[in-house]
Image: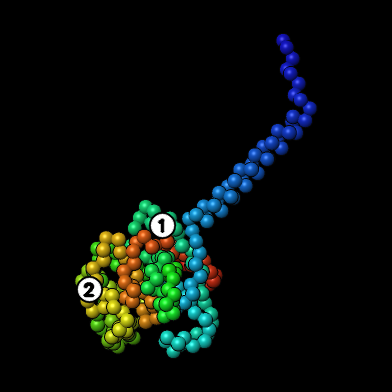
Amino acid sequence: MDSPTPLPPGYARGRPRALAFLLLACLVLLIFGLIAYRLIAFTTVLIPNASMEPTLMGHDSGVDPARGVANNDSIHDLILVSKLAYRTATPQCGDIVLFRAPKEADAQGMANHHPKEINMVKRVIGVPGDTIQVKAGQVTVNGVPKEASVVYRNGQRLNEPYLLEPMDSPQPTSARFAEGQPLKLGKDQLFVMGDNRNDSNDSRYWGALECSRVIGKAVQIIAPSARLRSFP
């Protein structure tokens, strides 16, 4: 019987090294793959103002000029936005979305005649085919009835527990869309509003939002640590 061919010198030592190198290469590829997926699938947004409070905080310490309320601290939530959320689905009422707003939404730019398309974060109130109307109504605050503006979707008054406070009644004269008269949304249109209705530049002022302008869906607050939470 022939004797087995002897292994080359160093073979026994080289095989584990090759296996370790292969595992390291796979780990590096996995890390880079996760980073690439993170860049493609998600983006982060720092909330700049109070238009979505109390859901998303965005204020500095001091007196809030819009409400005359003193803030003891500065809080600007950092949110995670899924850019793939609507690849296989469509925005639903209640979703919080990041979008590229039309130039008409840039109030400061409109004032100096140099409006730009800016990114904004708002809540979806109406989806394609819906009829939205803002009209005078009544709410109860701490057991006391109060006149306020309320939102109707397809003839049904919305229950909106996420609002910071009741909407002013009457609405500002610049709130021209869905105010008083119903607004029928087209097949590719959304109606978006801030949760801080009395300090929010939204669809009431510049009209319906084209679905193609939606960048993604807010899925989580990731900072500050005391504010961590996920959205459905």
> Pointer 1 and pointer 2: residues touching (CB < 8 Å)?
no
Identify the residue at image location x=35%, y=55%: 89
Name the quarter where the C terminus is drawn.
bottom left
Residue type pointed to by label 2: Pro
Q: Nearer the viewer, residue 108 or 144?
A: 108
Q: Which residue is mark 2?
A: 182
Q: CA distance from mark 1 to mark 2?
A: 30 Å
Q: Secondary structure at mark 2?
A: loop
The scheme the figure's colours follow is rainbow
Residue at the disc numbered 1: 85
Residue name at image x 74 percent, y 31 percent: 12
Decide: few, some or many residues near mark 2? Use Cα within 10 Å; few <14, some 14-19, many ≥20: some
Question: Considering only order in the chain, which callout, 2 or 1, is on the residue closer to the N terminus?
Answer: 1
Q: Quadrant of residue 182?
A: bottom left
Q: Residues within 10 Å of mark 1 (few under 14, many from 20)?
A: some
Q: Would residue 122 be found to the left or right of residue 77 on screen?
A: left
Residue 197: in sight, yes or no? yes
